[in-house]
Image (tube, rainbow, N blue to C red):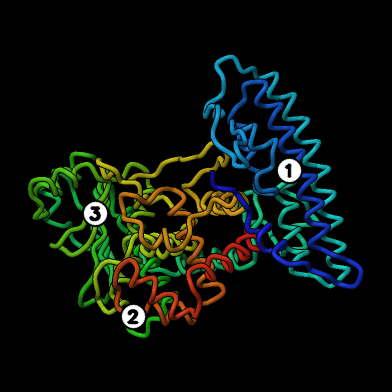
Amino acid sequence: MRTLTTALFLLLLTAAVLAGDFDFAAERAKANTWLAGEHADVGKDYAKAGLNVSARAQFERALSLVPEHADAMKGLGNKKVDGRWVSDKPLPKDDAAGAKAADADKIDKARDKFYGKAAERLRKLAENAEGAGLFTEANLTWSEVLYYVANDATALGKLGRKPDGKGGFAAPFINAGREHGRKVLSEASEGVEGALDPQGEGLGAKLYVHSGGAIIARATESAKRAARIHKVGAGASALAHELLGAELPLISERDPYTLTTLQKPEQYTAMVEKYTDLKGEEKALALKLMGEGQKSPWGYFVKEVYAETAEDMLANTTSLVVLQRFRAFGPRNDPWIETGFSYLVTARLLGTTLCVRYRLEEEAVTQARKASSPTIKFDTRTPEGQRAHVLGAVRLGKDIPLRVLASTELNDMKVGHAAKSLSLFEFFFDVHRDATLKWLAKKAVSKAAELEQCCEALGKTPEELDAEWRRWVLLSY
């Protein structure tokens, strides 16, 4: 059975960290042993009450602190045979039918009391590390304080976290990126209203148009909606150009990109059937999607269920056109690159990551939705939710290795793949911007060859990048 380890454990306990008489690694190991035991005890209480989902979260946290912690392994339903842990009676994935809310409340209170003590112990460890001049180790420990008390003022201050405007806190580079994205959007043009597009007749609707610069926007709702779509598209193009340091326009007035939002399902169906060249299975697939590309005019159209979803999808697509052209007009980028870069643009420009370009499965459904795992619950429609997923995965030692991510096909991409893709691109542009641009300036290739290009530009192996990224996540999220 695979042993779970956190990046923090690996980073801090691989060697003794000594400063004077203070042995940080030894003190952290003692804290981990105590923490793991407490988590396992809480897990057992949850399991006895039939609250298996919460029990699993506690047992997995214990294992992330102390690999093969006996009580945690047993709690998950394993037993030791000839010195090895093997599965015996796995802990059920779902809560028992008779689990009571009153029991949950009682155990939750006991858990929260333990969390308070855990935070206090880690605060003291972080302060001692600071006193010994071990500032990196101290900051990593302050990050762990936030696991137990998410709004701990001292830890937030030590890590430079500021309010993110959504009730949470974020690192300076995240807030700065979002503020700059808002500025880019506010300065983007709404275009100029033009004549109704004749394709509207085939849709049974008026198709309003706003155009100007490299973007043409169309909407069946109103001219005002077309103006907003133009603003979003122009903003996405500008931000993508800026991130890539593109010196020449990759989308221009001579070759504009058309963004269309259709308010009714029948309008979307008519657009697919009358104004695309799709046939057979491709056409059937397009009708199941929420958006599709178009050759005449060159662009992308979406079925607008919610305004913010449509805007996110169109901004996402625009950023990918810029990226593909920046990369010497080469083939489509691998899924992790498309997801990471486009999410970086929409996270900064709109504060959303709604466009699901992963886990398409047989239906290939592109939509905005909520997703969660038994141990990490969050709303993945937002950048904050994506980051929460990544931070939880890193703390549990469950993040997807870069080698695996880079070889993942589109239909195999899931929430964890998408979240790490965004996080990697935030990391790349925060820590390795020049090297990242050197990599992205090369023509896109595929899978192993693309990963080799990336690693060559950044001067690190995939494993070295993973290790550096995990440390960055712990300090930044």
Task: Determine whether 157 is above or below 438 in the image.
Answer: above
Q: Residues within 10 Å of mark 1 (few under 14, many from 20)?
A: many
Residue 264 vs residue 320: left or right? Answer: left
Amino acid, disc 2 = Lys
The quarter of the displayed image where residue 39 is located: top right
Few, some or many residues within 10 Å of mark 2 (<14, 14–19, 20+): some
Determine if residue 465 is in view. Answer: yes
Q: Which is more foreground, mark 2 or mark 3? A: 2
Horizontally, residue 244 falls left or right of residue 122, namely: left
Residue under label 1? 36
Which quadrant of the rendered structure holds the N terminus?
top right
Q: Which mark is residue 301?
A: 3
Q: Are the residues at dot 1 and dot 3 in contact (C-beta closer than 8 Å)? A: no
Position of 456 with respect to 310 (left or right) is right
**In this rendering, position of residue 126 left or right of residue 361:** right
Specify the quadrant that holds the C terminus: bottom right
Amino acid at dot 3: Phe
Label 2: which residue? 442
